[in-house]
Image (cartoon, helix red, strand yellow):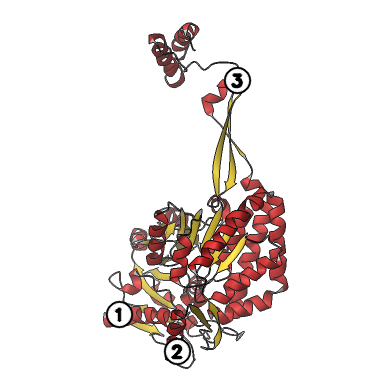
Amino acid sequence: MALLLEDRKTLNKLNKLLSINPGTLEIIGELEVTTEKEIKEIVEKAKKSFKEWASLTIKQRCKYMKKVSDYIMKNLNNIAELISKENGKPFVEAITADIMPTLELIDYVIKNSENILSSENINLGKWNLLNKKSYIEYEPLGVIGIISPWNFPFSIPMGQIVMALTCGNCVILKHSEHTPFIGLEIEKVFKESGLPQGVFSVITGHGLTGSQLVSSGLNKIVFTGSVSTGKKVMETAAKTLTPVVLELGGKDPMIVLKDVNIDYASSGAVWGAFTNSGQVCASIERVYVHEDIADEFIYEVVKKTSMLKQGIGLDKTTDVGAMISLQQLEIVENHVNEAKSKGAKILIGGQRNLDLPGYFYKPTVLTKVDDSFKIVTDETFGPVMPIMTFKNDDEAIEKANNSIYGLSASIWTKDIEKAKRIASKLQAGSVNINDCLSTYALCQTPWGGYKESGIGRTHGKFGFMEFVQPKHIHVDYNYNTKKFWWYKYSQNTIDMFENFLKFMFSDSKISSSLKFLEKFSKNKTI
């Protein structure tokens, strides 16, 4: 393991990337890092390609997206295997969490983009009486830079790329340095669709490469990653007034009410906390369970956690795979060790899995923690579930909202109407009732968060709107009639408008309308 870290440091100095399987520590390969000069050339090529691509109809662009979907289906197992090898997740999760949401989103885009992006009439209210009409056209922005993470290395960038391209933009993808070969696979997917040159490109590199892309004169940046890096992206983008969409993670609470189906909710908690080895921005990272059922709920969670098989992702029976890197594993270890030092009770797990060769941390459940612990306040991003109790709904809401994050949350109960009332009080971009985590895969719905969980939305109608700019077009059909508010001004103009405002916005309609017409008849324009 130490040798691999030294190899990576050496290759970084040589402007190269080393990709490894985090479950086996086997080297997958190495890649050249895209230089700043090459980035500028790629951006210029994309700008030249934009005009032609944007001139196509939405139907024409969707034909390319259909070819993308067909290619993915034909190469399903090969793509899933690469995802599992380079990311470390179980093979089944590569299919269900990376490939399936991508295919669903492409299907959604093909069926709905034309309707969502078509011109839209605006009701002008009282101004309609003056024979004025307004409508909005949605135009592509230009060249979009997408900086994507390693935890869902296929589905996150693919969804953003497909929506941006369908809107008529060109796209440049900078993939995570931990999963560069998946980035190249995405490049191949679009190349095989016959996409015109320059419309979509992939660059490879580290954080510096991403910073160079942000500074390269793009029309928008879409970044998914940590809060600290997201703030740096926003700071760099601000220098050129480049707009950003930021999805920056979460510390998602699970509220378990006392009337819940404990068997169902405990299964949801285990999957929501440990899928993808807990490396999900929408993972259940805080559990608040009503004190009356806490013991039974915790018992079921620990029992079900003990049934999970941890192992290499390509083993079809693996439930929990590897973590992406030693650095991420050490963050989890730090949070758990701090909790131990403060008196937390480890019910299961709490340490690395040394029986496996890669970056594995055992699925961990702990109690006797509160919001003075990092495990409760900071994004752990690992297979860890801290469980706490509450006495009443107000306390649960207060605890759930006590976070700098606000990506998603979940409420578990048989009383749906009560859950809806609680949901309206939670500070989160998505609130699940009797479900968790999988809402990212609902491509029809907006995805994004409150507070430090980010800015903007992806997916759904709101996701489309991030990749276009609305152009308002106004038509006055009275092209032979001068406007009564044009020059020249006089006392009569003032009297006319005073009565006009009374007619429009007060209760004295009849008298003010007569006075307005009197003044209007005397009004002179040049």
Q: Amino acid at mark 2?
A: Asn
- Contact (Cβ within 8 Å) of mark 1 with mark 2: no
Q: Amino acid at mark 3?
A: Tyr
Quadrant hosting residue 186: bottom right
- Contact (Cβ within 8 Å) of mark 1 with mark 3: no
User: Sequence order check: which comes first, mark 1 or mark 3?
Assistant: 1
Q: Is residue 43 left or right of residue 189?
A: left
User: Sequence order check: which comes first, mark 1 or mark 2?
Assistant: 1
Q: Answer yes or no: is residue 84 visible.
A: yes
Which residue position holds label 3? 479
- When the figure is inspected, residue 82 is found, relative to residue 135, above or below; the finding is below
Please give the name of the residue rendered at 43% of the width and 86% of the height, measured from the top-left corner. 5
Quadrant hosting residue 333: bottom left
User: Sequence order check: which comes first, mark 2 or mark 3?
Assistant: 2
Which residue position holds label 1? 338
- State the SS at label 1: helix
The Cα atoms of the two marked residues, 1 and 3, are separated by: 74 Å
Q: Answer yes or no: is residue 259 visible.
A: no
Residue 322, labelled with which disc?
Answer: none
The Cα atoms of the two marked residues, 1 and 2, are separated by: 19 Å
- State the SS at label 2: loop
Which mark lies nearer to you, 2 or 3? 3
Q: Is residue 252 left or right of residue 75?
A: left
Q: Is residue 71 left or right of residue 393?
A: right
Of 4 and 437, which appears nearest the observer?
4
Which residue position holds label 2? 353
- Contact (Cβ within 8 Å) of mark 2 with mark 3: no
**In x, y percent, where is residue 335?**
34, 78
**In x, y percent, where is residue 246?**
45, 59
Q: Neighbour class for label 2 at 10 Å: few (<14), some, many (≥20)? A: some
Residue at the extreme bottom of the image, as rendered: 355
- State the SS at label 3: loop
